[in-house]
Amino acid sequence: MQTERHAALQAYAGWNQNLSESRTCASGGTAWLLAKHFIEDLNGVVYATGFTLAKTVSVIRAASLQDLEQTKGSRYVRSSFPANLYDQLKQDLQARLPVLFIGTPCQVAAVRSRWERFRNESGMTGGESGMTGGESGMTGNEDDSLLCADLLCHGAPPQTYLDAEIRHLIGNRPYTDVRFRGNDEHDYHLSIWNKESCIYSVKARKQPYLLAMLRGVTLMEGCYQCPFASPQRTGDITLGDYIGLDPSVRTKAGGHNISYISINTEKGRRVYETFLRAQPAFRSVERPLGERLSVRSSILEPAGRSPLRDKFLQRLPRLGFARAVRRTMRMEILKESAFYRTLHHWAHLVRKALRGGSNR
Ligand SMILES: Cc1cc2nc3c(=O)[nH]c(=O)nc-3n(C[C@H](O)[C@H](O)[C@H](O)COP(=O)(O)OP(=O)(O)OC[C@H]3O[C@@H](n4cnc5c(N)ncnc54)[C@H](O)[C@@H]3O)c2cc1C
Ligand code: SF4
């Protein structure tokens, strides 16, 4: 079943000004604060991706702020959706609980399509299935109490790659979390944590797993032809990093990462307005619709398939992930090093001087 898609009606730059809440969030902390709003203000539940006790990155059901804590931050790996959790989501919707689902656009499409099929097969109508409470923002003839937020998505590597990378980096040492983003010194690092203590943290340009992911070497094959990298969104609301934001707005955030937020449906608009009233710590600035679109990646086109990908795939069965990715990214990491950059710079100056000399 094809799910409906919607172009943005309005766009905002936003961030949670309460840094004690948003320190480990990916960008502006919008996803987490919106989720908090569903739990605290609407007595609802949230389905979002977290790092679980089983050391997997997967969708969890959060009904308390404690459950929600593990959903902070983007985890650059494919998030799985346990089969039994979908039944739970269906039950929550049948019980008319306000439900927020946050995920990649392909996850949102899957959730919507299964829920719509169920509603059609069981003959449920809007009135029977929908929440009608005024405070939620989901009122009128809207068809149900499900609000979906999709993420702008570059793509994700499979979980097996991340497992192999962690084993390579820390062996059998215990760990409780893996992070990639944050409003702290670990933003765009692969960092591994055992409770509050950081046992590994290396920035993207020196870290093979993260650099290979960002450069389009190790994504799932389908991500390179992703049909959801489009301004037509599967979510009522879309969240991403605000790349291309005018510097005058960026200054207002005082160094905080900033979310791109697009409101794609009337339901999304009502919930966003209710959210802003209920969560005054959230700063929201309306922006022109074309501003984020001008930065094409992830919103107008899928991630490029790196020319290094075939080499990586050839090496993978023979060397295993950790060695294959290191061998493949060796030159890329070297090119990012300060030594190489300085050398490159001097070589450029010498070439320029010689050209100048020969023109004289
Ligand atoms: C795999 C991936 C690729 C992305 N690529 C881009 C991109 O190219 N351009 C861009 O602008 N933004 C991208 N994003 C979105 C961006 O990184 C932030 O997630 C987004 O800006 C929301 O930030 P936040 O501070 O509001 O989220 P937070 O408040 O930190 O909450 C994080 C949210 O992300 C969800 N999440 C975390 N990991 C995953 C996962 N693996 N799969 C599904 N959901 C997950 C959690 O459920 C949670 O709701 C990507 C996110 C992911 C997970
Ligand atoms: S790039 Fe597309 S297919 Fe890949 S995880 Fe993101 S939404 Fe899904």
Image (tube, grey):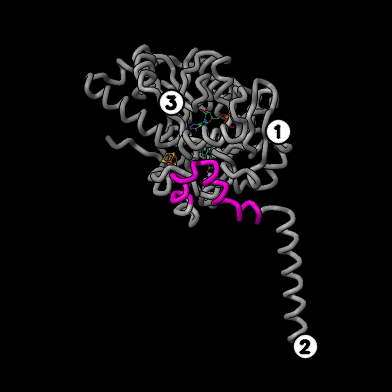
Which residue is farthest bottom? 360
- The three-letter amino acid code for the residue at tag 1 is Asp
- The three-letter amino acid code for the residue at tag 2 is Arg
**Spatial CA span between label 1 and label 3:** 30 Å
Q: Look at the numbered disc 3 and give the secondary structure of its residue.
A: strand
Looking at marks 1 and 2 on the same chain, the residue that comes earlier in the sequence is marked by 1
Residue 199: image location, x then y, percent: 68, 29
Is 117 situated above or below 205?
above
To which residue does mark 1 refer?
A: 184
Nearer the observer: mark 1 or 3; the answer is: 1
> Does residue 334 belong to the magenta stretch?
yes
Is 184 situated above or below 119?
below
Mark 1 Cα-neighbour bin, 10 Å: few <14, some 14–19, many ≥20: some
Residues drawn in magenta: 312-335
Q: Nearer the viewer, residue 127 or 188?
A: 188
Mark 2 CB within 8 Å of ligand 1? no
Query: Pointer 1 and pointer 3: residues touching (CB < 8 Å)?
Result: no
> Does residue 178 belong to the magenta stretch?
no
Name the residue at 31% across, 27% down.
Answer: 114
Q: Which mark is residue 147?
A: 3
Looking at marks 1 and 3 on the same chain, the residue that comes earlier in the sequence is marked by 3
Residue 248 visible here: yes
**Spatial CA span between label 1 and label 2:** 52 Å
Looking at the rendered image, the quarter that the N terminus falls into is top left
To which residue does mark 2 refer?
A: 360
Mark 3 CB within 8 Å of ligand 1? no
Name the residue at 72% across, 35% down.
Answer: 185
